[in-house]
Structure formats: C-alpha cells, structure tokens
Amino acid sequence: MQNQVLIAGAGPTGLTLALELARRNTPVRIIDQATEFFAGSRGDGIQPRTLEVFDDLSVIDAVLAAGIPVPIMRAYLGGEFVGERRMWEPIEPTPALPYPNPWVLGQSRTEGILRDRLAEFGVRVELGTALAEFTQDATGVTATLTCDGVAETVRAAYLVGADGGRSTVRKALGIAFEGTTDESLRMLLGDVRADALDHEFGYWFAGADRPMEGIAMSPLPGGRQFQFAAPLTGDAEPTLAVLQEYVDRYSGRTDITLTDLTWVTVWRPNVRLAERFRDGRVFLAGDAAHVHPPTGGQGMNTGIQDGYNLGWKLAAALDGDESLLDSYESERRTVAARVLGVSSELLDKLVDGHEDAMRRGPETQQLDISYRDMSDRRPLVLGDRAPDAPLKDMAGNPIRLFDLFRGPHATQLYFGGTGEIPTDAYAVVRPGSTASGRYVVDVDGHAFAAYHAVDGTRVTIRPDGYIGEIS
C-alpha cells in the first residue's frame, strides 16, 4: 500500500506511533520479529509528561487503574532497618498540571494497554515478522518482510525503525550510534516474587559499611512480584540462584525466598545517540535512536514522545504537507541528547555512592521539555508545553483544556472572544461573558494566567500538546 507507514518494532515507541497514525485514519502496519509479546517490567516508571500523552491517547484511565504511585522504600543496612525513603516526594496537582507525579506500571502491561487501544482502530501487531531488507526512492520504501520462512515484498510511503538498540533499520542505513558502552559494570534486572516482604513497599538492602552498594526491590502492580536490581559481580549468570544469593547476602535474612523469575536481563551502561534520526523516507525512534541508563526512568518515556512527535507529522506529509518532517529530528534529537545527560548524571551518582543517588527531581519528569528558541526568555513561547486549566463549557459543565486538546487535531484558543473567531476554534471568556461561536468559560482565571493571556491573545496548540503559534 503506497500511502501506508511501516513500523518495525512494537514496543512502547512503535505502539504510540501506530496509535497516532491510526486515529488519523492513516494506513499503518506494525511488525515485530519477536514471536511473543514482551513479558517483563523493564521500563516501569511512567513520567508525568507521558501521562499527559496517555491522556490524549485516551488510555490514561487504564494506565492509572493498572499502576501504583512510586512506593516508599524501606532501607536496611547490615540487616538493620534504618528508615523509610522516597525517590520522589509526591506533590498535589495544580490547574496547569493534572498529573504531577510519576506512576509505576510494568512495561509489558503498558504495552498491552496500548495494543488494546490500537486494536480499537483495527490495527494489530504482526508478531514473528522481521524486516529483512529495504530500499527507498523518491516516492517510497520497498521492504522485504519474512514470516515463517516466507518472504513478502511491501511498499510504503515511509518506514520507521522503532526496533531497539540493535536496530536493523539504523544499521542498514549506516547511521553511526555515537556514545560509549562500559563493559566493566553490569547490572542484573529481573521480576521475582518475595512473599516474605510486604508488597506495599520497596526495599533497599546493603551492607552497613557501604550503604550505596546493595540491591533494590520495587513492588510491581497487578500481582506479587518485585523488580529486582543489583550489581552483577564477576562472571555470575542471571539466574534465580544468583538473585537469591544476593538477597541472602545483603539482607542478612534467611526467610526471604525468591520464586517465579519471569523476566531477567543483564544491563551494561550503554549511552548512545544516533548521528541522525532521518534518512530520506526512513526515520529512527526510541531505543533505535537513543539508549539510556535505567537511572531516572527516561528511556521508554523519551521513546513514547518520539512516536507522539512523529505521528502527526507523518500524517500531515501523507496529506500533502511534508514541511514538518525535518522538525522531527531537530526537535527530538536535541531532547534525546539532553535526557541522556540527565540519565548519565544519575548513573554517575549511583556508581560513586552519592547520598542522593536515589532521589529524583523535576529534571526527570520531562514536563520542562520544550522546542522553544532558547534565546527567548518569555515565560510561554512557541514550542513550550501547553498547560492545562479547568473551565466550564457552554452548558456550564466542568471541562478542562486537555479535553479540548484530546484527539488528532490542532486546537485554536481565542482569549476574550474578541474579533472574528473561526468556527473550529474556541473562545476562552471570563465569567459572565459569552461569544458568538464555541466558547469555554475560564471560571477561576487559570487559563488566562497559565497562558499569560489578555483579551485578544490567540494561541494554537499543536496536535502533540505544544504551542504552535501565539500572538
């Protein structure tokens, strides 16, 4: 199908991109060479900005229902309880910021929710289907797919490689994956049961003399499992027996029996950024474009927002406007480079044993990501995240700006309701006022305040929730 988008890789990045296209009625095909869906926690931290993306994709209720807040960690040194700590101090929502706190949900469950939503548009992931090779020309991409030993040739307008750190697409394009891999440091991550531990809490077990060298066990929602994280020493293999040995050694207890190891991986510090995110009609997104340390919970969230940024631009290109496509790389590669810096700094703190190595601050939330001209010092400008605000609709019912933004469209706001207002725009008026067309009432003044607006201010919100125009 000449006008379709082919996505290689059905993790969170590929699924988000597929959803963005499908809800715009853009033909999309999403394949994955794996024969089974991923079943593990891996990227289990969902940042506030990603929750806003999930609100727009209409999966926020399912994500919130399935997940849990960041748990309190109980710290034990030398077998002795020394106190409770938080990686993140919860804060109250504000009118502009409805989801201020990170959320915990195993990656495989997040993927399941995204797949279910995608299926509502009639699109399903094709498992066991590998991208063998591809070529591109001025009008599209010709790809060879293999499934059960059978080759298929397909034609697409664009190809997106969301196929992970070992990306077939990136390697075929010969795009350099710049950065470093530290083979001297290995970390063991896995999902296990530990029924002797209270599942309402996380745990940090370490020796009394080296409090920052230990193991973390964080509860996963929807069952009895914990995500286990520990430094892997020597040539140890990632087995249940090795995990048990670590628990016995660091906890000083004999009653913690680990069972049901359902997912395990060995992670090495691999910090890399693709030299470019686009080659003609082929794009890279997610781990195919940037890989992060797990510190700070940035990798999955950055990939989701890659897909969210690229989807509406590809849809516009297929509708005849290709002018936005170059902005994908300029916007997202800059963000990825910055986020890699945040993740790497947190990793360095962990390795060096800093006291605050486990603390997480606003720099990890991704709410401050902006595509603005950094020389512009005004509080809200082109490229900034569009704030939320509580309103009332024309019938007096409560509504939010995010409700107006939700969906595949751009949104125009005309503050004060003055002048000629397009039929597809919204006037934002003060209490006691109306407008000739569609309008909402800024009952408490939060919208005017968040947008630094006066009567006559006009704002266009891009489909991905960033300021497209402001005057």
Image (cartoon, rainbow, N blue to C red):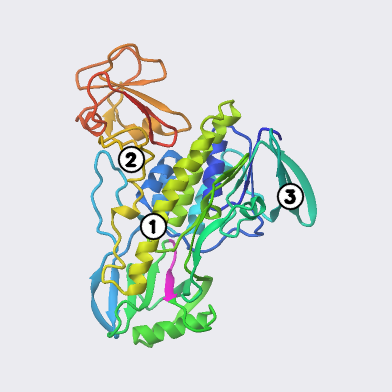
For residue 341, the mark is 1
Give the amino acid at mark 3.
Answer: Leu
User: Relative to residue 407, is residue 220 depicted above or below?
Assistant: below
Where, quadrant-wise, is the C terminus in this rendering? top left
Q: How many badges with numbers are in the image? A: 3
The amino acid at mark 1 is Gly
Disc 3 or 2, which lies upstream in sequence? 3
Q: What's the residue type where badge 2 is placed?
A: Met
Q: Determine the residue positioned at 38% across, 72% down.
A: 217
User: Residue 8's mark?
Assistant: none
Q: Is residue 58 above or below residue 236?
A: above
Spatial separation of the CA atoms under disc 3 and disc 2: 43 Å
The residue that label 3 is drawn on is 145
Q: On the image, which quarter does residue 250 sit in?
A: bottom left
Q: Which residues are magenta?
A: 222-230
- The residue carrying pointer 2 sits among few (fewer than 14), some (14 to 19) or many (20 or more) residues within 10 Å by Cα, namely few
Say which residue label 2 marks.
374
Kindly check if marks 2 and 1 are in contact, taking CB atoms under 8 A apart as contact.
Answer: no
Which secondary structure lies at badge 3?
strand
Q: Position of residue 456 (x, y in %)?
A: 26, 18
Question: Overall secondary structure of the magenta stretch?
Answer: strand
Q: Is residue 198 visible?
A: no
Front-most of residues 120 and 246: 246
Rendered location of residue 97, percent (x, y): 29, 42
Q: Find the residue positioned furthest to the right.
A: 150
